[in-house]
Image (cartoon, helix red, strand yellow):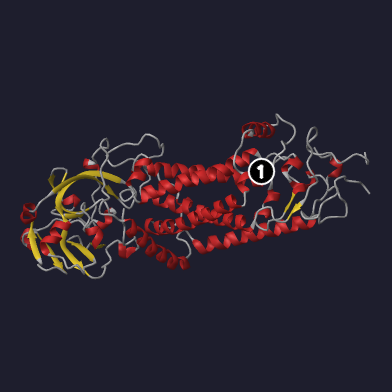
Amino acid sequence: MPPAGVAGSGDASAIGRRRFLLAAGGGAGAALLAACGSYGPKSAQRILMYAERKNEVVERALFRHRSMDVAGRHALDAGNAFPAYFIAPSVPVWDPTANGPWMLEVSGMVARPMRLSLADLQRMPSVTQRINHYCVEGWQAIASWTGVRLRDLAAVVGVDPAARYADFQSFDDGYHESWDIESAMHPQTLVAYGMDGAFLGAAHGGPARIHSPIKLGYKNTKYLTRIEFMPVRNGGYWSDQGYEWYGGI
Amino acid sequence: MPDEPIPQAHDGEEELPPPRIERNRHAPIVRVTHWVAVVAILVMAGSGLRIFNAYPAFHRRGETFCCYPFEGRAIPDWLTFGGWLGGARHWHFAMMWVLVANGFVYLAYVYLRGEWRDLVPRRGDIRDVVQMVRFYLFIRREHPLQGKYNALQKGAYFAMPWIAVLIVLSGIAIWKPVELAPLTTLFGGYVWARYWHFIGMVALLGLAAGHVFMVFAVDPYVLPSMITGRYNERFAPERRNGRPFYHLLPRWAPRPAVADAPEAHVSAPTPASPTEP
């Protein structure tokens, strides 16, 4: 223990510098906080958008048609706990008396544009897959989905090899989301008309919706009316509001 | 008394060399990566908590989760960053590259310059940890001799990169649970990978909070060394016998042995035998 006799004022200049550095650090921190708010500084937005574009390059490089999602054998189905959502003020229900029978239009860069009824879809080869649904919010829900592989549908309509994107449109207040063609042609990307062994109900996007484990939930357009193959991307309901356009899993 | 050497904190078998003023206690790369890590970790944690608040729970829909007592309870807004889910995700997915690149630069430097030797635990460190704890609990009187860091610091600073590895890998696992499914499986699936990501964050922030507390409570004199690199060994805790909030003031530091030589630098050898004028 140092004896009391050596108690001195210490290195005065060093203390002064220390004080200065602390004050400077505190001042810089306060300025930073004031500039940020909880959204972060405005000037950072361009960097964040740049990072999003670069992340998309990384995500597309990681993307494989061989990568498949499989729900855990011991994991439970979500069942009634599967969240339902839509952007319209009330559950969108297709009204055949006002709009005629529901039809799925497949158009854009295709050799044979088509309008398919639910019965037409059911006549096509179908798959049933028990997979995870990944929401942007962070939750995960398991269900069994039945439908037509979009890649099979694309073969039927003859998609132009130059088509790079697909836009999925709905009767839910104009909700739509566009995808890169690679993700759209993933073998687990379905035009789904069945969920957990029943026809797709109004709460989950009936009569038919896009469903795939390789895209975040908001990319999977419900209440599907039209699939349009395009040379350029077409944004989307949530993508246009600032969520990532790619939204891959 | 005048003929006796200044009493040191350590009596007995070993004596501390005369204190030096280090100009470069932490290399510039270490200083820069330290503060970049501070900003990156704070932004990652804040934006991560904002993302978490969109679904502040771990259970898969239709299941329950065993191991989180606050399932469904949101984190207070003032602890979050990014403003909204989409904004926080942009921050998170941009800053992750800064965090990882910064970590690689730091680890490469520490490895190539051999400074890992100050950090990697070795035999005997357990005993030193026990001695440090005994000292802090006033069971042991004298501060144990240490190198650049004491045994508790070494443990904390060594653990941090490993926790960071856990956080980064579990983060990748919940970013790409389909494309990188084997990694997600390694963590026990998406739900558990999300949990380890969260637990890793808590552990890292816990260590960081302990670190900041100890800097201010035991050795505030070390703060400039992480900014300018300068550190006066005279104020080292082992010379002050510093415990948290104990012997904190500069007056507890022994007066320099060499009078009228305030700028005794690392390069200039100091006289081995101190003499009073």
The quadrant in which residue B144 appears is: top right
Residue B17 sits above or below residue A239 on the image: above
Q: In front: A95, or B121?
A: B121
Whether residue B255 is visible, yes or no, is yes
**What amino acid is at disc 1?**
Tyr
Q: Is residue B203 left or right of residue B233?
A: left
Q: How many marks?
A: 1
| Residue occupying image coordinates x 60% and y 45% | B211
Q: Position of residue A241 (x, y in %)?
A: 33, 63
Q: Position of residue B18 (x, y in %)?
A: 81, 46
Q: Position of residue A59 (x, y in %)?
A: 34, 58
Q: In front: A36, or A128?
A: A128
Q: Is residue B253 left or right of residue B24?
A: right
| Residue occupying image coordinates x 75% and y 58% | A16
Chain of the residue displaying label 1: B
Few, some or many C-alpha atoms within 10 Å of disc 1 (few <14, some 14-19, many ≥20)? few
Question: On the image, numbered disc 1 is attached to which residue?
Answer: B149
Q: Position of residue A8 (x, y in %)?
A: 83, 48
Q: Quadrant of the N terminus of chain A?
A: top right
Q: In front: A7, or A134?
A: A134
The quadrant in which residue A94 appears is: bottom left
Residue extending farthest top: B139
Find numbered disc 1 in the image and state the secondary structure of the residue it sits on. Answer: loop
Residue B176 sits above or below residue A237 on the image: above
